[in-house]
Image (tube, coloured by chain):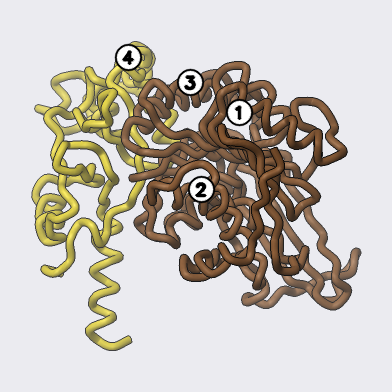
Chain colours: A yellow, B brown
């Protein structure tokens, strides 16, 4: 696993949104692509943030939710639905994670796995030296490539 | 990424080899006779370029389960192809071909393809402008899906030209006709598989082809390629018009994919610093080399080099 680098496992996909795309558009995109999140870029394809389904869900919950860490106090889903409708035309920049954690193709898989474990990232944008988006790396890619390597060692 | 390959209406190509294919009868297809591959002219060009080690980003519209399958197949080609599609709700089209090698029949079933709404077109145009800045060459090739105006090639070219990019088109007459009113690319290659019309006129003799090639150059194209009787081409540049012919016999059953190989060959030549006539010669040599064997694999660069001696280019104007 130590010899593997991000370039060996990354997906060369440039699915992205702009800062002024709306929450509604992003939810639609996540639904159609089945991605859990997408990089937010500027007009030069430089990564300026990351928006995940978690970020949008969090934005629809009351601010005290993060303190209580439970939805038990919510009487029903009406508040959540009302909040989602309220923010649906907001620019996504308002809810995106900034600054965003990114990796470079030369970073090791071990580093990526460590960050996934410690920070809970599901998808991480891959950028070049100019911070331009060149792909993504996800949990499944880490598992898939690691599994392949083990099979090669066992000669299967 | 060197090339932005625009394929507005990509397809998932399914190919079944079923000997003694009979209607109203169940056919069980062996796994090795069932192939799935990403398709659409722009996609094909990117796939061919990847075989030559050229990186590209493919863009257009994909949707539904078929769209996911298409992207998944495209990713199997390797890291030289990046994808940046706009996602839509309708399904990407699927082209099914049933080949009977005993009775020599080919049965094709093509789905109609998606409808693209204006919101998706706007999203695509904005993303195109961002992506185009990252490449040297833009190739726009293939059909235009429902809901998208035929002038889209021109709109994209107008954006690409703001960033001084070299633009290649391969399209049918109605697309070229509508798009060139908006902007002209550097290279136009006519897709004449379904019609021999050029700018709305049916051309019948060599003189008319020569005159049409001359007109495109007069209007601002750097290079125009008009296919003539399938295997010949009239090629117009600022220096004149040439007729390209093969010196070898062409097996017409092996023409599939040669048009995309022609475009990919020209892009290779352009990246090598060749211009105009030499670029067209290289593309034509690649296309002729492609007809020397069956299968989807493009010819090697050595084979293309050898085939430059197997083509004739005679000045006709």
Callout 1 environment at 10 Å: few (<14), some (14 to 19), or many (20+)? many
- Spatial CA distance of label 2 from label 1 is 16 Å
Q: Earlier in the sequence, mark 2 or mark 1?
A: 1
The residue that label 1 is drawn on is B217
Q: Which residue sits at x=38%, y=31%? A: B132
> In the drawing, does residue B262 fall left or right of residue B50?
right
Q: How many marks?
A: 4
> In the drawing, does residue A91 fall left or right of residue A34?
left
Q: Check the image and report above or below for B242 versus B114.
A: below
- Location of residue B205 in the rendering, given as x and y in whole percent from the top left corner: 85, 39
- Location of residue A120 in the rendering, given as x and y in whole percent from the top left corner: 16, 46
Q: Check the image and report above or below for B11 versus A73.
A: below
- Residue B279 numbered tag: 2
The residue that label 4 is drawn on is A87
Q: Which residue sits at x=46%, y=55%? A: B49
* Residue at disc 4, secondary structure: helix
Q: Which residue sits at x=28%, y=54%? A: A10
Q: Earlier in the sequence, mark 3 or mark 1?
A: 3
């Amino acid at each position: 696993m130590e010899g593997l680098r991000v370039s060996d496992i990354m997906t060369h996909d440039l699915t992205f949104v702009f800062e002024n795309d709306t929450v509604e558009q992003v939810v639609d995109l996540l639904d159609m692509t089945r991605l859990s999140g997408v990089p937010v870029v500027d007009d030069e394809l430089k990564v300026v943030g990351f928006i995940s389904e978690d970020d949008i869900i969090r934005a629809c919950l009351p601010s005290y939710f993060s303190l209580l860490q439970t939805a038990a106090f919510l009487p029903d889903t009406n508040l959540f639905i009302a909040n989602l409708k309220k923010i649906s035309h907001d620019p996504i920049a308002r809810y995106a994670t900034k600054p965003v954690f990114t990796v470079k193709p030369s970073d090791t898989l071990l580093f990526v796995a460590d960050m996934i474990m410690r920070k809970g990232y599901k998808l991480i944008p891959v950028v070049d030296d100019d911070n331009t988006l060149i792909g993504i790396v996800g949990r499944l890619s880490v598992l898939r490539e690691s599994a392949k390597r083990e099979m090669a060692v066992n000669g299967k | 990424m060197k090339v932005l390959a625009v394929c507005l209406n990509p397809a998932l190509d399914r190919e079944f080899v079923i000997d003694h294919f009979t209607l109203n009868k169940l056919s069980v297809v062996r796994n090795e006779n069932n192939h799935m591959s990403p398709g659409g002219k722009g996609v094909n060009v990117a796939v061919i370029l990847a075989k030559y080690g050229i990186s590209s980003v493919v863009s257009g519209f994909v949707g539904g389960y078929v769209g996911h399958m298409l992207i998944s197949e495209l990713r199997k080609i390797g890291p030289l192809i990046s994808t940046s599609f706009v996602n839509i709700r309708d399904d990407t089209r699927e082209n099914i071909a049933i080949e009977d090698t005993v009775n020599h029949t080919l049965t094709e079933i093509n789905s109609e393809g998606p409808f693209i709404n204006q919101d998706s077109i706007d999203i695509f145009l904005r993303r195109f402008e961002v992506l185009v800045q990252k490449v040297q060459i833009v190739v726009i090739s293939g059909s235009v899906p429902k809901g998208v105006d035929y002038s889209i090639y021109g709109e994209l070219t107008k954006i690409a030209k703001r960033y001084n990019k070299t633009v290649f088109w391969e399209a049918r007459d109605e697309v070229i006709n509508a798009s060139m009113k908006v902007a002209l690319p550097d290279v136009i290659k006519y897709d004449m598989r379904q019609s021999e019309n050029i700018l709305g006129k049916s051309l019948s003799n060599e003189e008319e082809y020569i005159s049409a090639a001359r007109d495109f150059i007069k209007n601002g194209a750097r290079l125009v390629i008009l296919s003539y009787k399938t295997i010949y081409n009239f090629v117009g540049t600022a220096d004149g018009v040439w007729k390209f012919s093969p010196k070898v016999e062409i097996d017409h059953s092996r023409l599939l994919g040669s048009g995309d190989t022609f475009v990919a060959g020209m892009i290779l030549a352009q990246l090598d610093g060749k211009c105009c006539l030499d670029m067209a010669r290289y593309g034509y040599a690649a296309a002729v080399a492609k007809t020397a064997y069956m299968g989807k694999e493009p010819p090697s660069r050595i084979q293309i080099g050898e085939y430059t001696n197997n083509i004739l280019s005679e000045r006709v104007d």
